[in-house]
Amino acid sequence: MARIKIDLPAHFSFSTRIPVRIQDINYGNHVGNDAIVSILHEARIQYLLHTGYKELDHETGTGTIMTDIAVAYKGEGFQGDIFTVEIAASSFHPFGFELFYRITTDRHAQTIVIAEAKTGMLYFDYNTHKMKKLPLEMKTALDTIPA
């Protein structure tokens, strides 16, 4: 079986901590794949706010929209874990960029990688439902990493 391979950057410009909640746990008694995607979403919102942007600016009707997602699960997360989610932006083009994520937790004096992920992001006009050119100011605010 072919596995998804995500080439993570050497440097992450942002990090946040997100506790695992009881509702994140599935019947296997570990964090479910749906919860991982929700945790990535929460971390992305925090990252954008950190750079001075929102996923959706209600005044202008513009923001970002996710075009794709890839997640490679590396380890199990459990209720009580506190995840560290690191994020970096890269692969800028006129209408968007990619975000890279690494989720880890510290357990028993070890850092355990829970998941690695990548999302494709477009700058989007929610009023016209069309992609829009990524503002230079936003590109500058996001941490670029070498391709």
Image (spheres, grey):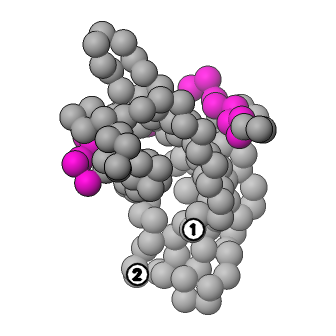
Q: Amino acid at mark 2?
A: Glu
Label 2 sits on residue = 59
Magenta segment, which residues? Answer: 4-23
Residue 7: x and y in percent read 70, 32
Quarter the C terminus occupies: top right
Question: Within 10 Å of the Cα at label 2, are there few (<14), some (14-19), or many (20+) other Cα atoms?
Answer: few
Vertical arrangement, residue 28 with respect to residue 133, above or below:
above
> Which quadrant holds residue 18?
top left
- In the visual, does 71 lie left or right of 109? right
Camera-side residue of 78 and 56: 78
Residue 84: x and y in percent read 36, 32
Quarter the N terminus occupies: top right
Secondary structure of the residue carrying numbered label 2: loop
Label 1 sits on residue = 65
Asked whether the viewer can see residue 82, the reply is no
Secondary structure of the residue carrying numbered label 1: strand
- In the visual, does 55 lie left or right of 92? left
